[in-house]
Amino acid sequence: CGLPTTNFTFLGFLPRKKGKRRKILGELSQRSETLIFYESPFRILALLEELLGIFGERRIAICRELTKKFEETVSGALSDLLRSHREKKPKGEFVILVEGKNV
């Protein structure tokens, strides 16, 4: 997917409550390593919108159904992938990789 993997932080699922999630994302937005999250199909669009609002434009990868028959990975600019995912009905479990802040 083209994102650096020499340094990364795996965060699992973020909190469901918007306030807690936004606070954590604000803190994470300053990190320089690649960030990795799990997300459900019910919250994927909200997460992408929050990432764009808090992190600004970054490269990301969206991986769906890893290790399963319908595995799919797309990568590119956050705004482009948000736009394309608004047109789809999200299915399956997602892994999101976010480029770290350039220092």
Image (cartoon, grey):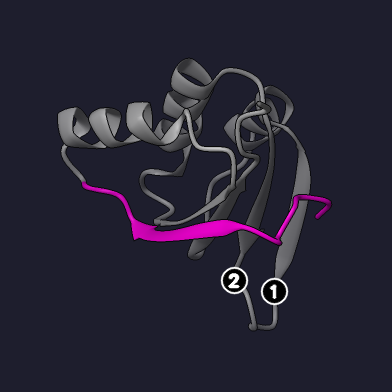
Query: Quarter-wise, where is residue 21 in the image?
Result: top left
Identify the image quadrant of the C terminus: top right
Residue drawn at x 70%, y 72% as measured from the top left: 71
Give the camera-side residue of 84 and 62: 62
Q: Where is residue 30 in the image (x, y as percent from the top left)?
A: 47, 28
The residue at which mark 1 appears reads as 70
Mark toward the viewer: 2 or 1: 2
Q: Give the range drawn in magenta.
A: 1-15
Residue for badge 2: 65
State yes or no: discs 2 and 1 in contact (Cβ < 8 Å). Answer: yes
Identity of the residue drawn at 69% across and 83% down: 69
- Residue furthest front as drawn: 103
- Identity, as a three-letter code, of the amino acid under mark 1: Phe
Q: Where is residue 64 in the image (x, y as percent from the top left)?
A: 61, 63
Place residue 65 in its image quadrant: bottom right
63 versus 79 height, above or below = below
Label 2 neighbour load within 10 Å: few <14, some 14-19, many 20+: some
